[in-house]
Amino acid sequence: MGKILITGASGNVGRYVAQYALENGQEITVAGTNPDRLTKMFKDRAEIVYFDFTDSATFHDALKDVDRVFIMRPPHLGKPEDLKPFIEALKAKANSLSGYVKEFKINDNLAETILTDYPELANDNKLA
């Protein structure tokens, strides 16, 4: 089994998700815009990578050796469509692992928010 990518691991929710994963023997990659803070929090218990939802150049390193993802939307990204480039990168990764990945879902709440607040995105069939 691979690693879990946890975004927002220095925040209120993400840190508990990361801690729970570690306590249950999971390997994790914690990703965020402040790797120094993540290093202080997780030391050598997690792989730490710089990641920014608005910079697609950071997606590859964050997704390396990852087979599961916990996405915590940063507060400064208020529109679900801001996550679309990363969701597309996840889909591409899932497609490249087609023999390994059995199912790929967007979090129901995220998908519901996108489809409710941005119905035009539902019509392009890239998030459905």
Image: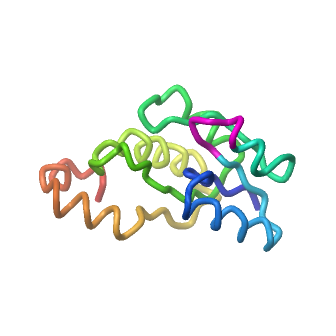
State the residue at coordinates (41%, 43%). Answer: 88
| Left or right position of 1 against 111 | right
Q: Foreground residue, 21 or 90?
A: 21
* Residue 100 on the magenta segment: no
Residue 31 placed where, x, y %?
62, 44
Q: Foreground residue, 52 or 35?
A: 35
Q: How is the image coloured?
A: rainbow
| Left or right position of 115 against 40 | left
Residue 61 placed where, x, y %?
65, 34
Residue 66 placed where, x, y %?
67, 50
| Left or right position of 22 against 111 | right
Q: Give the residue at the far top of this rendering.
A: 57
Q: Quadrant of residue 69?
A: bottom right
State the residue at coordinates (67%, 57%). Answer: 4
State the residue at coordinates (72%, 66%). Answer: 19
Quarter that holds the N terminus: bottom right
* Residue 32 on the magenta segment: yes
Residue range (magenta): 31-37
Residue 36 placed where, x, y %?
71, 35
What is the tally of numbered marks visible in this picture? 0
State the residue at coordinates (70%, 49%). Answer: 29
Q: Quadrant of residue 128?
A: bottom left
Looking at the picture, does residue 15 appear above or below residue 20?
A: above
Q: Foreground residue, 25 or 89?
A: 25
